């Protein structure tokens, strides 16, 4: 019998997991227990300090789980010192005494890790020494390999890397048992993996409250870094760029910072614009003259040289090159000078560092304009890693070309999960979409950017999830090779942090949250015009409902958890949803209130009060976070995020201006008002006949027709809405409205029995009348009848047709809802679930595919039905992801045609030409709205049609297709998807 592929894969995974399960909670020799002796951990006296320190953490972790701390023995130079009671743990690095003894006696096989970078083996060893029947061995190829092996056991026994920084609870056990078999962990996928704490204003406030401040004013001293370095190592990171705002200077703030990092095993660097380990604050305070190589070369070089001399004894990855003062473009720097600077910097390393130059890490960040110097053709040492960057908004500027991958130093990526700068800073809490980060970083990895990955994670708190995701990818990219990688990771992560019962739900919450924040970052909501339409497609109201539904889901998951787990779930999952929904509610409600004021609705004031309450709630949510765990995180979420008026954050949260209405604002119009879709004003105010948008049998499932009936002044009014067609039904056809209060507005939704509607075009009359028993504060007169016209269009499509149907001069199709997706010569299309702003993304696969052409390449086919009887022109609008032309030799292109006539194929660049080190025109618009739109004019015939679409580069990600025959309304997300029918 053939085993289905997915079942076989799952079975294989279970078998492999069982083979390498060196610790278990079920049965076996007792490793540690609540009522037994402490587990004995052997570490050789000459072992690295960082390994011994991590072993002490492991001893504490056993105590956190079973209630009895382990003991660490550092006095034994041979295995004879192993405890004869219980099962000892032998920890060591290849080349140290305890591990060598096991190798020499053939008890331990290190052949797969010896000489490797940061790899380790877990082995259950029988009879390691006389009198000891079994031992657990943790052996690393180097010091960090051993440290990672130690912390991996910590994680296996139930201690999350985030136990301190995110308060993830530890599930206690009565006992932990020794399993069986071996587990070999290969070298990490990316050599250097780390984070950059940046724009760290709130983290500074928090740290100042919790750790001693330096004499120089810096707040990130040794106590802070002890916690941070432990977190990085538990996450299997090895590289760190320290905070550099205000007074912060890592090496100057605390003389112990440098030795501490080296003891822990952290590779230190400095940010992209702080060469040779010198902090920007040091440059401002300690350097003589200007930061200008042209006019102050000797002093700048001396300043850099002092940094190398200071750090020469510690493991360092040096930032090379330079930028202008204050992380800006230099007005005088050129490529010739940069060549000279890098050569001079390498001479400094040779002079001071007691290692061959090729063994010392060196990286040059090609950030913003710096890229243009490289593209101009520079002679830069092969030993220097080219660190490519994104555009500060998660879209890679560049990946290595084929020639660049041959460089000895390789390539890396500096990626942003937060940023301060144009077009609008985003630094409050994470507003990142993990599947997008996966799509970009997977591409970078496949294009051989594997030497360094570093992520800008702002204040760390609020960015825990994307930080962990990024570092996990960098550590083992083999687990991130499919389109479901982000979702699968979220489930694994949530299961570890909160338990398996809530893992699926937590993953869904985070994916949906990523979609919502991709549409607009919170900080951009104060921009004008407002992000979402309050008039067309019910866009703003629908988006707010999505946030409401997401919060309901998150709150339900929170309520299902134990009290001990709720705190960490609040920090990592519920808070981003609750806080994000509250800010979104504030702005959407404010703009709906502006619309209501235009329509003279008395409920304007209710919406403004709701917006005020959201503003108050925002502050309460922050206070709730700060009160967690007796104020442990006080001030860490205090960043202003409401009321941006410029690129950078405001000094404090400021509520936007709200609309209010009084009876005196209304004038002489009657009490009864009506509003229709697609119009801002109340047309009844001018005594006009109102024409609704047409209805037809194929309207999008997400679309409806309705009237809003409301009061325009305080009082009570009864109304009746009548129709002259029996096949038209109206919800809330009669009723009484009262203002002020919650009964001042009603929505009358219209439905049609299409079986009874005459074929072709017809018009139905609706009449809205005020009943005679109405009253209000100024008069008792009855308003004239309001006449309303509802256009109907009944048509049918061929019975065998499959595809999307035009309605109201629009066809809208989500990318994944194609009729057919071709595969040719090993190149096909894949769907990225949760990618983008509406549903998902579609792109070429694999990402290493060569450039395609039309019609030779694989295509996407979308069947649709045009309701016109004659050919006509349409605007084809492709909603794409935010990717840039990150391969200068292969700009992103798409091709398209209606039907199969190859002579009608149009090929179009996604982006206009732009110079290296710059950004394309309209980039700011694209990053604000979350992607690019490509528009082209195309002729469409009547009836059944077929759109053929070719994505010609793997960097192009398609989200949505719109064909506009003249019916498109202004909105952020485009019209709802057209109805799809099939026989």
Image: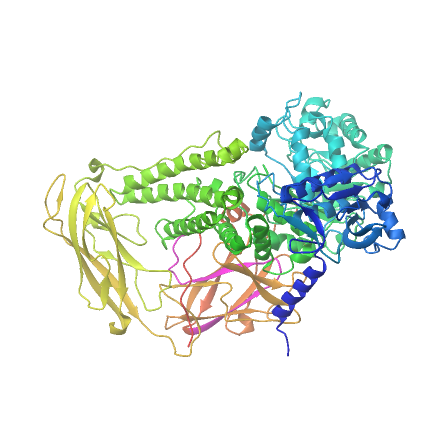
Residue 578 at x, y = what percent? 45, 43
Q: Residue at x 66, y 70 (%)?
A: 826
Numbered-mark total: 0
Q: Quarter of the image for the C terminus: give it.
A: bottom left
On screen, residue 652 above or below 841: above
Q: Which one is in front, 466 or 278?
A: 466
Numbered range of the magenta stretch: 944-971
Q: How is the image coloured?
A: rainbow
Residue 356 at x, y = what percent? 87, 40
Q: Residue at x 35, y 65 (%)?
A: 699
Q: Is residue 955 magenta?
A: yes
Q: Is residue 421 magenta?
A: no
799 to the left or right of 403: left
Residue 337 at x, y = what percent? 76, 36
Q: Which one is in front, 205 or 944?
A: 205
Q: Which one is in front, 856 or 120?
A: 120
Q: Quadrant of residue 420?
A: top right
Identity of the residue furthest to the top in this view: 215
Residue 888 at x, y = what percent? 67, 53
Q: Is residue 697 visible?
A: yes
On screen, residue 782 above or below 219: below
Q: Is residue 912 visible?
A: no
Q: Quarter of the image for the N terminus: give it.
A: bottom right
Identity of the residue furthest to the right in this view: 104
């Amino acid at each position: 019998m053939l085993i289905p592929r997915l079942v076989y894969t799952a079975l294989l995974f279970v078998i492999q997991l069982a083979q390498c399960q060196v610790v278990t909670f079920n049965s076996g020799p007792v490793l540690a227990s609540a009522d037994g002796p402490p587990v004995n951990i052997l570490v050789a006296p000459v072992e690295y300090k960082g390994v011994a320190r991590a072993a002490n953490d492991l001893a504490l972790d056993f105590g956190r789980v079973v209630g009895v701390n382990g003991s660490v023995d550092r006095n034994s130079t041979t295995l004879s010192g192993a405890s004869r009671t219980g099962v000892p743990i032998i920890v060591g690095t290849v080349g140290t005494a305890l591990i060598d003894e096991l190798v020499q006696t053939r008890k331990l096989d290190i052949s797969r890790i010896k000489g490797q970078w940061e790899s380790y083996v877990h082995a259950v060893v029988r009879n390691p020494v006389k009198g000891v029947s079994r031992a657990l061995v943790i052996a690393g190829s180097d010091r960090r390999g051993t440290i990672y092996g130690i912390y991996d056991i910590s994680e296996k026994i139930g201690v999350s890397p985030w136990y301190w920084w995110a308060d993830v609870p530890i599930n206690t056990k009565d006992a932990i048992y020794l399993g069986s078999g071996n587990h070999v962990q290969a070298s990490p996928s990316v050599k250097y993996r780390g984070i950059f704490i940046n724009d760290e204003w709130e983290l500074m406030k928090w740290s100042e409250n919790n750790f001693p401040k330096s004499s120089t004013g810096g707040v990130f001293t040794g106590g802070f870094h002890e916690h941070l370095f432990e977190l990085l190592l538990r996450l299997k990171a090895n590289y760190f760029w320290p905070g550099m705002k205000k007074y912060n200077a890592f090496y100057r703030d605390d003389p112990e910072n440098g030795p501490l990092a080296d003891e822990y095993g952290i590779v230190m660097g400095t940010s992209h614009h702080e060469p040779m380990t010198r902090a920007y604050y040091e440059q401002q305070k300690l350097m003589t003259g200007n930061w200008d190589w042209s006019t102050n070369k000797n002093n700048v070089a001396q300043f850099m040289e002092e940094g190398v001399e200071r750090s020469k004894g510690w493991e360092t990855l040096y930032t090379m090159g330079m930028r202008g003062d204050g992380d800006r473009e230099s007005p005088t720097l050129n490529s010739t000078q940069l060549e000279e600077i890098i050569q001079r910097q390498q001479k400094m390393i040779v002079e001071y560092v007691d290692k061959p130059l090729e063994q010392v890490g060196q990286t040059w960040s090609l950030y913003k304009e710096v890229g243009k110097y490289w593209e101009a053709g520079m002679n830069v040492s092969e030993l220097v890693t080219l660190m490519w960057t994104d555009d500060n908004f998660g879209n890679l500027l560049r990946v290595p070309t084929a020639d660049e991958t041959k460089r000895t130093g390789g390539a890396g990526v500096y990626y942003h999960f937060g940023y301060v700068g144009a077009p609008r800073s985003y630094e409050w809490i994470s507003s990142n979409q993990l599947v997008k980060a996966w799509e970009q970083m997977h591409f970078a990895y496949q294009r051989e950017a594997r030497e360094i990955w570093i992520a800008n994670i702002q204040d760390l708190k609020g960015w825990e999830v994307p930080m962990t995701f990024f570092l996990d990818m960098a550590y083992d990219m083999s687990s991130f090779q499919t389109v479901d990688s982000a979702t699968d990771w979220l489930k694994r992560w949530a299961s570890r942090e909160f338990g398996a019962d809530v893992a699926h739900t937590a993953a869904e919450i985070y994916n949906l949250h990523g979609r919502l924040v991709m549409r607009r970052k919170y900080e951009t909501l104060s921009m004008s015009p407002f992000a979402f339409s309050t008039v067309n497609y019910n866009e703003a109201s629908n988006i707010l409902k999505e946030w409401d539904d997401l919060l309901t889901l998150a709150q339900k998951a929170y309520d299902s958890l134990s009290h001990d787990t709720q705190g960490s779930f609040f920090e990592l999952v519920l808070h981003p949803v609750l806080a994000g929904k509250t800010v979104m509610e504030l702005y959407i409600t404010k703009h709906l209130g502006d619309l209501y004021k235009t329509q003279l609705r008395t409920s304007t004031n209710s919406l403004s009060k709701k917006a005020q309450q959201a503003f108050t709630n925002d502050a309460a949510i922050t206070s709730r976070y700060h009160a967690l765990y007796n104020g442990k995180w006080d001030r860490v979420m205090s960043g202003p995020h409401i009321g941006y008026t410029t690129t950078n954050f405001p000094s404090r949260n400021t509520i936007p201006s709200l609309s209010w209405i009084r009876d005196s604002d209304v004038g002489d119009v009657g009490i009864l008002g009506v509003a229709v879709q697609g119009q801002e004003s109340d047309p009844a105010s001018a005594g006009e006949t109102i024409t609704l948008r047409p209805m037809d049998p194929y309207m999008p499932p997400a679309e409806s027709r309705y009237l809003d009936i409301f009061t325009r002044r305080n009082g009570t009014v009864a109304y009746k809405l009548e129709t002259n067609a029996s096949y038209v039904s109206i919800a809330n056809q009669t009723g009484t409205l009262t203002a002020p209060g919650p009964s001042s507005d009603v929505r009358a939704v219209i439905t049609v029995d299409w079986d009874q509607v005459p074929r072709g075009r017809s018009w139905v009359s609706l009449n809205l009348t005020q009943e005679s028993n109405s009253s209000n504060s100024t008069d008792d007169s009855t308003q004239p009848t309001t006449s309303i016209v509802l256009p109907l269009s009944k048509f049918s499509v061929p019975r065998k047709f499959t595809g999307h149907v035009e309605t109201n001069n629009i066809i809208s199709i989500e990318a994944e809802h194609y009729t057919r997706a071709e595969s040719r010569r090993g190149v096909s299309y894949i769907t990225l679930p949760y990618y983008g702003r509406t549903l998902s993304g579609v792109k070429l696969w694999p990402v290493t595919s060569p450039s395609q052409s039309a019609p030779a390449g694989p295509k996407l086919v979308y069947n649709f039905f045009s309701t016109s009887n004659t050919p006509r022109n349409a605007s084809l609008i492709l909603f794409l992801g935010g990717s840039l032309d990150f391969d200068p030799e292969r700009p992103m292109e798409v091709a398209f045609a209606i039907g199969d006539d190859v002579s009608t194929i149009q090929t179009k660049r996604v982006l206009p030409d732009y110079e290296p080190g710059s950004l394309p025109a309209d980039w700011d618009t694209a990053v604000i709205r979350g992607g690019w739109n490509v528009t082209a004019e195309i002729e469409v015939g009547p009836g059944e049609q077929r759109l053929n679409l070719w994505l010609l580069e793997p960097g192009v990600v398609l989200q949505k297709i719109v064909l506009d025959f003249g019916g498109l309304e202004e909105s952020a997300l485009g019209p709802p998807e057209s109805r799809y029918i099939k026989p």
